[in-house]
Amino acid sequence: MNAPFTAAARPRVALLATGGTIAGAGVAPGDAASAAYRSAVVPAHDLLRAVPGLQRLADLRAEQLFQIDSADFTDEHLLQLARRVAALCARDDVDGVVITHGTDTLEESAYFLHLTVKSAKPIVLTGSMRPGTALAADGPANLLHAVAVAAHPSSSGRGVLVVMNQEIHSARDVTKVNAMRLDAFASPHGALGLVVEGTPRWWRAVARPHTVDSEFDLAGMDALPLVGVVSSHGNMRRELYDAWVAAGARAIVHAGFGGGTVPEYLKPVLAELCARGIPIVRCSRIGGGLVIRNASFDDDACGSIAADDQNPPRARLLGALALTRTQDVHEMQRVFDRY
């Protein structure tokens, strides 16, 4: 941080910038195209200066934590981000945190923070689908709305939030569903609310535990256990699973057809891996709907785990977090049922 917050009536919001399209610019001076641009080149303070009205909402200070494309996020980046957010939330002079992030892995970072940062203070992630040099760039409005949500007292205790295209989503549900449109983020159970004339309006709450009620703790979490993901397709091969085992994976997410369906020719492979102590987590490659235990596949006989409605990226993260606490597949199933 460059300077301390001032003692003022306005909420004090810390901005953590990590790069992404919201910090992108055209590949040539004056380039207004949205498809050809350089990601992660605009610094945090310039992002703030590009949004009129921000200072009326909150007392802001910016920090450039990373300047990368979110496709380059690793588990090490996730842990560093979570620790920094937790440290900011622990400060008496911080009322909320806004994180600017590339959209490719925004949902993964949001979900990880949702389960590991033990604070009721608002934590809001936002990004953009177009760089700031594009015509009708969406980043400035998204940032304005994210600060409005982080600064509002009604946002406390709702877990980590994602604000895009005026919608407020829970990190537990939200996913990127379109590669280009501005309404690229959606939640299968619906948005929590909307930002209306600079103020959040809420319609639902999150029932699953998060933040202060989460059992996961960053303390002593030096690294995340390696969890692999294999997405289903016709004519699959066991070599994909064997490669993850050879790489040191401690669990593998099977992103199955439909409701987590496993082809007959792969059932012995998954059973063998579970018997060798490599838990298999069944989820759906579709990214929506439930995977029900023992439906279309005998999880009890195999020793596998049903992921409920977690999509493959979130199943990977939740599986890794579960492994920081237990190796028991029954306990891992409890974790998936709870979160």
Image (cartoon, rainbow, N blue to C red):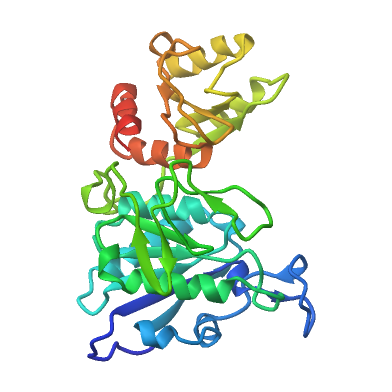
- Residue shown at 68% from the left, 20% from the top: 237
Q: Is residue 216 above or below residue 285?
A: below
Q: Position of residue 207 (x, y in %)?
A: 28, 42
Residue 132 horizontal/vertical position (percent): 64, 77
The image shows residue 9 at horizontal and vertical percentages of 23, 87
The number of discs equals 0
Q: Is residue 75 visible?
A: no
Q: Nearer the viewer, residue 135 or 221?
A: 135
Is residue 326 found left or right of 306 in the rendered image? left
Instruction: Answer above or below: position of 299 versus 77.
Output: above
Foreground residue among 138 and 29: 138
- In which quadrant of the rendered image does the C terminus lie? top left
Q: Residue at x 76, y 77 (%)?
A: 32
Q: Quadrant of residue 199?
A: bottom left
Q: Is residue 159 left or right of residue 44?
A: left
Q: Residue at x 23, y 68 (%)?
A: 90
Q: Between residues 312 and 141, which one lies in front from this camera angle? A: 141
Residue drawn 31% across and 65% down? 122
Q: Quadrant of residue 50?
A: bottom right
Q: Is residue 284 visible?
A: yes
Q: Quadrant of the N terminus?
A: bottom left
Q: Is residue 278 or residue 144 the one in the foreground?
A: 144
Q: Position of residue 63 (x, y in %)?
A: 43, 78
